[in-house]
Image (spheres, helix red, strand yellow):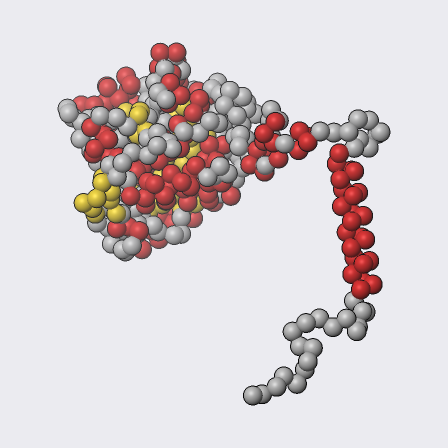
Amino acid sequence: MRKNGNSHSGRASFSDRGWLLPFLASLLVSVTLFLATILGIFSSPYGGDSLSFDFISFSRREDSSGYFVESDLKMPLNPPGVSQLKGPPRLAYLISGTKGDSQRMRRTLQAVYHPRNRYILHMDLEAPPRERIELTMFVKNDPTFREVENVHVMAQANLVTYKGPTMIACTLQAVAILLKESANWDWFINLSASDYPLVTQDDLLHSLLHLPRDLNFIEHTRVVGWKVNQRAKPIIVDPGLYLSKKCDVFWTTARRSLPTSFKLFTGSAWVMLTRSFLEYCIWGWDNLPRTLLMYYTNFVSSPEGYFHTVICNSDGFRNSTVSHDLHYIAWDSPPKQHPLILSIKNFDEMVKSGAPFARKFEKDDPVLDKIDRELLGRSVGRFAPGAWCVGSSDDGSDPCSSRGDDTVFRPGPGTERLRELFQKVMSEEFRSKSCSAQR
């Protein structure tokens, strides 16, 4: 049998005690620091009475939120109920389109243009590169756009499926760009190429001047009744997340139960949302926006539910909602997934509604010419004029070729229609429809 050549292996050798002195010194320092810490916490630095353990007990304090970093971020930058009236308002627009929409997007842009506002144009991946280049060159070559630098075309073309979450993703990307490039806007409005304004921007900005800047115009209602089975429980897959060609969403055979940690809301996909709420959606400091974004990834018609559910489940914003999408939309009876196409026969009802926007319109429908002529005072290929247009109109010249003070507005007949609309939607009866009243 092989013998172990080291008779002291496996046990400590006490012949070398060089470690003892450093160990004792380290122990003395540790004990000293520990006693100093104890005395520093539980005795008053001013010689007063000793402090009880309740000093560091979160459960015994009335408010311990100051200990957590989220407490500094949980409230919106402009809390609801606090109006931030700092000069005339500014709007940020997203105008989106697909294949064949380049001309319509140009027309809508000219009809809603104002130097105070910001504009993002997005043509989805289904549009050929030629159309996107034409739209970009139109913006680049326009002298007003070039001077003011408030119109931009998104270089990244996203594939957008209306019923799926890709529309939400595209909207959030546009919002992030707008937040990064400019701090000077109050509300965000999303339009498609089939939308068109019914009032001038002078009418709209002048009317918004008298409203609190914390209001979110978003039509919404609780998901109940038939919507539970047809909207909330089905699980869909948006092919736009995986493919490079647009097609309809895929329906799975699986079903899901309703969530218990938040309540579902639905409504119109067309909104006017405050900057502070959209900052919350992008930053998501309490994680609700990100949680719901994941939830709505497989939700049918998620653009009609994501922002609605976020805002109605947020303590900081649910009291800021006005349940109106600021659009005139005609539906058949019973209503289906898509609205009716508007025409001349809808003109009087559009005007009577008081809404600043309407949809859906066919390309170059005669009713658009009637709106330009009778409501906007707009000529073909030109901006809808406002007080900022100070050029001469002699000999058919474009008065908007010379730009004046963009803080001055020239309200027209559309202002009175907007005043009546805002009085209605701000009434106590109408506000009872807000999500805070439906919880």
Q: List x then y, in percent, for residue 354.
A: 32, 19
Residue at the spot 24% in from the left edge and 54% down from the top edge: 245
Res. 113 in view: no
Instruction: Please indicate whether residue 71 sits to the left or right of residue 237 in the image.
Output: right
Which one is in front, 128 or 321? Answer: 321
Where residue 281 appears, as percent x and y from the top left, is 45, 37
Q: Residue at x 63, y 84 (%)?
A: 4
Image quarter in which the C terminus is found: top left
Q: Is residue 164 shown above or below 73?
A: below
Tell which of 406 and 330 is nearer to you.
Answer: 330
Residue occupying the far bottom of the picture:
1
Which image quadrant is residue 360 in? top left
Residue closest to the eye, 19 or 9: 9
Q: Within the image, what quadrant is residue 198 found in? A: top left
At 17% from the left edge and 30% from the top edge, which residue is drawn?
Answer: 336
Residue drawn at point x = 35 percent, y = 51 percent = 157
Q: For this view, does 30 lie left or right of residue 106? A: right
60 lies above or below 417: below
Q: Which of 421 and 283 is in front in this view?
A: 283
